[in-house]
Image (cartoon, rainbow, N blue to C red):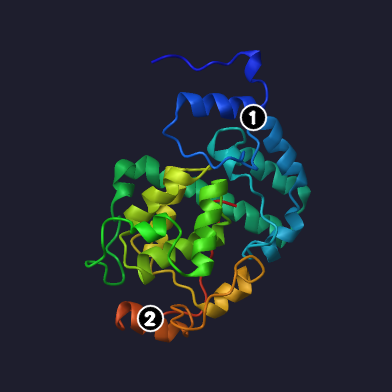
């Protein structure tokens, strides 16, 4: 295999993108560079811009303050311990505690991967809701972002164009695919992983299992109220007619799981990507 060029002619991002597209013409070209500039220098600059004290209260909102450091962590530009030490030097506030906790979840997922290996690519636990009838391939309308549900199609478009999604948006998409569309979590996890600029096998696939309930005590679902509260300023409104999310959690549990699961109104928003 021919070694890729690293000479000075490829010093800017535009030149690198053009060169890589010529070498790998089968890759989908969106025509735009990623908003996430690579390298440790860029990662440290993003870290300094991160408004940590806003994180605790805003992290679940799609337009809220999150670190967006995952592309640099997943590619080895920044280390988890480095981020933990940085956060602890800022203050001892609840927001710092929340951020450090999310770093710990990411580290935990890697420990699970180290222990289980490729077993994370299959159910680690028995699902807590019926999933034996789920289809094993991702429907084309989901892959193409043409589901007809504006909120979900917007998230898919964002994922495909930028390679990045807010963690809560990832949870929405995963829940929609697994529980509302009855698709096996592995098909959705593989698809999302292939598009992510911060793709991390352990965090991605174990988070999908957390949503699916094969690595958690319950499935993660959302309703219209939750979607509007946390994503309302970012996502377009969905048509009222045949809105699959416009139900109480109790009603959704009955519709989606035929009474096999009794939901609690709230749940932890795992933030391994933020």
Residue 148 occupies quadrant: bottom left
Mark on residue 175?
A: none
Q: Which image quadrant is residue 134 in?
A: bottom left
Residue 194 visible within the image? yes
Query: SS at mark 1?
Result: helix
219 or 39, which is in the foreground? 39
Instruction: Determine the residue positioned at 51% across, 83% down.
Output: 240
Front residue of 120 and 61: 61
Of residues 179 and 156, which is closer to you in this image?
156
Query: Please, what secondary structure does the residue beneath circle 2 have?
Result: helix
Q: Is residue 162 above or below residue 223?
A: above
Q: Which of 63 and 82 is in front in this view?
A: 63
Residue 163 at x, y percent in the picture: 54, 46
91 with respect to 82 (left or right): right
Q: In this view, does 263 lie to the left or right of 230?
A: left
| Disc marking residue 253 | 2
**Disc 2 from disc 1: Cα separation:** 49 Å
Q: In this view, does 16 lie to the left or right of 147?
A: right
Location of mark 1 (residue): 14
Count residues near mark 1 (Cα–Cα under 10 Å), then give few for <14, some for 14-19, many for 20+. Answer: few
- Local packing at callout 2 (Cα closer than 10 Å; few below 14, some 14-19, many 20+) is many
């Amino acid at each position: 295999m021919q070694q890729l060029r690293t000479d000075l002619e490829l010093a800017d991002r535009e030149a690198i993108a053009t060169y890589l597209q010529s070498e790998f013409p089968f890759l989908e070209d969106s025509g735009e560079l990623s908003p996430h500039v690579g390298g440790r220098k860029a990662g440290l600059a993003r870290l300094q811009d991160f408004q940590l004290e806003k994180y605790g209260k805003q992290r679940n909102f799609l337009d809220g303050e999150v670190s967006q450091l995952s592309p640099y962590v997943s590619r080895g530009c920044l280390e988890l311990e480095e981020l933990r030490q940085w956060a602890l030097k800022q203050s001892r506030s609840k927001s710092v505690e929340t951020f450090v906790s999310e770093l710990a979840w990411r580290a935990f997922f890697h420990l699970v991967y180290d222990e289980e290996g490729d077993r994370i690519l299959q159910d680690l636990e028995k699902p807590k809701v019926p999933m034996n009838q789920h289809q094993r391939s991702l429907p084309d309308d989901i892959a193409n972002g043409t589901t007809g549900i504006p909120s979900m199609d917007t998230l898919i478009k964002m994922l495909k164009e930028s390679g990045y999604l807010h963690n809560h948006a990832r949870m929405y998409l995963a829940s929609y695919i697994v529980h509302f569309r009855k698709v096996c979590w592995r098909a959705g996890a593989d698809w999302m992983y292939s598009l992510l600029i911060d793709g991390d096998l352990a965090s991605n696939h174990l988070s999908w299992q957390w949503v699916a309930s094969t690595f958690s005590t319950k499935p993660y679902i959302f309703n219209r109220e939750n979607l509007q509260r946390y994503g309302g300023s970012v996502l377009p409104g969905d048509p009222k007619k045949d809105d699959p999310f416009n139900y109480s959690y109790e009603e959704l549990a009955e519709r989606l799981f035929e009474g096999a699961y009794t939901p609690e109104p709230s749940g932890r928003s795992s933030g391994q990507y933020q």
